[in-house]
Amino acid sequence: MKKIILLPSQIAQKIAAGEVIERPFSVVKELVENSLDAGSTEIRVDVVEGGKRLIRVSDNGYGMSQEDALICFERHSTSKLTQEEDLERISTMGFRGEALPSISAVSRVSLKTSDGIGEKGTQIVREGEEQLRCEDVAFPRGTRIEVEDLFFNLPARQKFLRTDRAELSRIANYLTQIALAFPDVRFSLQHGNRRVFDYPAVSNLKERLYQVYGKSVLDGLIEVDYKEDGRAVFGYVSRPPSGRRDRNHQLFYVNNRPVKDRMVQAALNQSFRGYLEKDRFAEAFLFLILPYAEVDVNVHPTKAEVRFKESKPIFYLLQAGIAQAITREIGIKEVYPVRPEIRESRQIDQKYQPSLMKFPDNVEVQTRESFGPETKSETGYPRVLGQYLNTYIVASDEEGILIIDQHNAHERVLYERYTEIDQKKGWPGKMPLLPMVFDLSASQVLNLEYNRVLLEEVGFLVEHMGGRSFALKEYPDIFKEEEAKQVFLSLLEGIKEEKVLDRKGALVATLACKSAIKAGQSLAFEKMNYLVEELFQTSNPSLCPHGRPIILKIGRGQIEKEIKRK
């Protein structure tokens, strides 16, 4: 008795439909993509009961003749591909020819369409696999598709649909995403008698962002516009150091197609490393424009994922574009320009020496007897007024009073120095008089083995002594011998693979943290001035490498208001 049989066509069709149509949102997505490919400038979506009862998508696109309307419900019927080579240069939103047959297989469908050429349009009514009627109707140029009773013939699938509100939320989120990609198209969403939104056509992405999210979100964004080697990235990202507590505003597009891609998200996260406050995520509305042959969009039934021919160029394109935007926004060196003699002294081709990494020790301690009217020091940087709680440096500039966390400030300075040293492969090291022996836990041993190369690159040389015992044979010259062991153990915990994407960056940040001055440490005025000058020559004086704020500014206007001078 044979065990393998061929499934009846109606069962096979329902299974295939389930790969494309998962819930009401899937129907809306497929139909809206068809509307966009038809050149529509207005798309209206009406739903009832979150789309479970009714989904209606109306557009003013090219429409179809009766001949095309009759064949569009056949599987793999499409107007977007004619030969196999076309799969390598897909420029349309849809192309598989599975949307309408998949939708009609699991619902009751009514299609009205007209190409505007004849005097009449066409109406086709279907229920599941069966076509009930096809007739001429009066209808303007465009298409309207009504999908009723989704999964009426698949009650098991109906049970897995969520509440009306949850299903509506998915639909609204998708339409919002696609509206950003096509600002020149009007999108509207109606749920029963309630108008959810109506976004008239606008001229650019910035205006659409204002429509969708409002002024408060738009004011927290900076523009990205970067081109290289026939590729481009444009859009908007967070203005440092602002961000969100979730990733809901991280939207990515490839050739106007909304996509989810871990590599693209990793490029965003690494680009903002050290520029956002701790536990904050960058907002991003980013559009990649790539040659069609470099992107494979035919890797998932719902077209939500893409595959890049080469990932590295895309990763670097994103990083370069975001870095350019951040640098342009921060503009630190324009605010506090470096004096020529300081700039020349920094152009060192050889390795940094340890004396350049720490505060100079041969300074003379002085006391400032009065603040005076000046707001900047002779070097053009904020003027140091004193120290509070042996933890904060109090300084002034033309805009007000600055409260500077000395540890976080020094950590930022050292992080950028250490990053430059690492890029030059110039870490100075030294050996202890006697090897420092210690035991590691099983998880620490695994971390050591995984990160051994990185640790050696920054000067930590460890030798296995047998069992779980290890010896630290060499360490960076920036640490005292009694510090080296604790710093090394801290690094093992700070660069776990599952927690940190940029392990090298995390390692360098931890090195900077461990070697920076601590809270509670008294500083002479000269050391405070030295630190303030160094801080305002970094790329980002507002945040430490771990995302903690460095400076609290109390504006002059706020002071005068509280003192009642204004």
Image: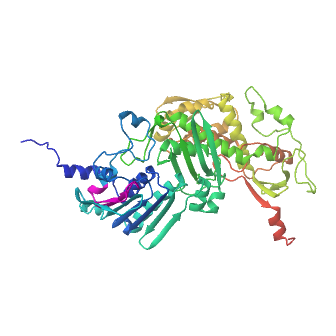
Q: Is residue 37 visible?
A: yes
Residues in magenta? 103-124
Corner quadrant of residue 427 = top right
Residue beneath the point at 28% across and 47% down = 75
Q: Which residue is the extreme one toward the left?
A: 1
Is the C terminus in the top left, top right, bottom left or bottom right quadrant? bottom right
Q: Taking 214 as reference, is 111 left or right?
A: left
Q: Taking 330 as reference, is 272 left or right?
A: left
Is the N terminus in the top left, top right, bottom left or bottom right quadrant? top left
**Whether residue 557 is situated above or below residue 351 in the rendered picture:** below
Whole-percent x and y of residue 234? Answer: 59, 45
| Residue 506 is covered by the magenta coloring | no
Residue nearest the observer in this picture, 513 or 348: 348
Corner quadrant of residue 90 = top left
Residue nearest the observer in this picture, 175 or 524: 175
Whole-percent x and y of residue 408? Answer: 70, 49
Residue nearest the observer in this picture, 222 or 441: 222
Q: Taking 368 as reference, is 229 left or right?
A: left
Q: Is residue 480 visible?
A: no
Whole-percent x and y of residue 356? Answer: 77, 34
Number of numbered discs: 0
Whole-percent x and y of residue 313? Answer: 54, 34
| Residue 123 is covered by the magenta coloring | yes
Corner quadrant of residue 526 = top right
Q: Which residue is the extreme one toward the front?
A: 119
